Image: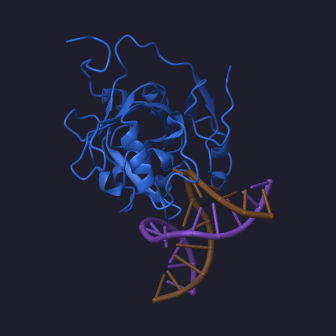
Chain colours: A blue, B brown, C purple
Amino acid sequence: MPRTGPDAPSRPFPRELLAGDTLAAARALLGAHLVRDPAPADAIRERRAGRIVEVEAYIGEADRASHARFGPTARNRVMFGPPGIAYVYLVYGMHHCLNVVSEPATRPAALLVRAVEPVAGVAAMRAARAATRRGTGTRPPPDARLASGPGLVCAAFSIDRSHTGLDLCAATSPLRLEAAPAGEPGPPIVETPRIGIDYAGEPWTSMPWRFLVAGSPSVSGRSPRATA
DNA sequence: GCAAAGATTTGCT
DNA sequence: GCAAATCTTTGCC
């Protein structure tokens, strides 16, 4: 069995890296892979995988930007549970967003997966994007832009609220996280304030809790600026 | 029971 | 640069 390449053995993402400090977990998640096995209902039956290049941290009930600010509710209850679990919600009535629950069950926290760089299953991603109501727009995006935003990640990977509660650290889950390929160095990381949370007010709007892989062509944004 | 807002994306001006 | 699309969740009466 080769140690690198498409047939390299994959390792589930270690749950212990999500069980502690969420900011450390955010940095650890960059470079890891999001993987979805093919399903019978897929238009194109192939495995989809992408390298996580952008995440945001939402930490504790005091964080006025976090869904946990309401306390436990029917929607956010998994945030108050164990780490490694998927929390998917619908935003603006049309886009789904994928979160990975972090920290022990005693503290509500999660990491929003904001962008991934496609690694495998690009055709299936395109088909999934095209199947959404708004499709892929008037022009097909380049491969690197197929999942370059939180709503786009879920569209490209066919993720919706039914995935909430799924264990992303289990090797048997159809949707899961896998550790970065063996030998791959940790990516250069840029930290910025979070996006789209002006409603939260200070100090939350200024907390540098958005983490990006520097220079990735797949980070969110209309015209991502190269961080040379 | 109803009103308001939202962890976004796209297209048009 | 701005507004529309679209519907669930939360907050208040």
**From the image, which quarter does the N terminus of chain A lie in?**
top left
**From the image, which quarter does the C terminus of chain A lie in?**
top right
Which corner quadrant of the image does residue B6 belong to? bottom right
- Residue A168 position, x and y percent, is 30, 38
Q: Residue at position x 40%, y 37% from top? A: A122
Q: Which is more toward the observer, A60 or A211?
A: A211
Q: Which is more toward the observer, A136 or A227?
A: A136
Question: Image height check: is B13 above or below A168?
Answer: below
Q: Residue at position x 35%, y 63% from top? A: A74
Q: Which is more toward the observer, A52 or A24?
A: A52
**Residue A91 visible in the picture:** yes
- Residue A197 position, x and y percent, is 62, 51
Question: Image height check: is A23 above or below A195?
Answer: above
Q: Residue at position x 50%, y 35% from top? A: A143
Residue A130 shown left or right of residue A6 in the figure = right
- Residue A15 position, x and y percent, is 30, 30
Question: Image height check: is A223 above or below A31?
Answer: below
**Residue A107 visible in the picture:** no
Q: Which is more toward the observer, A31 or A198?
A: A31
Badge count: 0
Residue A143 shown left or right of residue A5 in the figure = right
Question: Image height check: is A29 above or below A130?
Answer: above
Q: Find the residue positioned furthest to the front.
A: A139
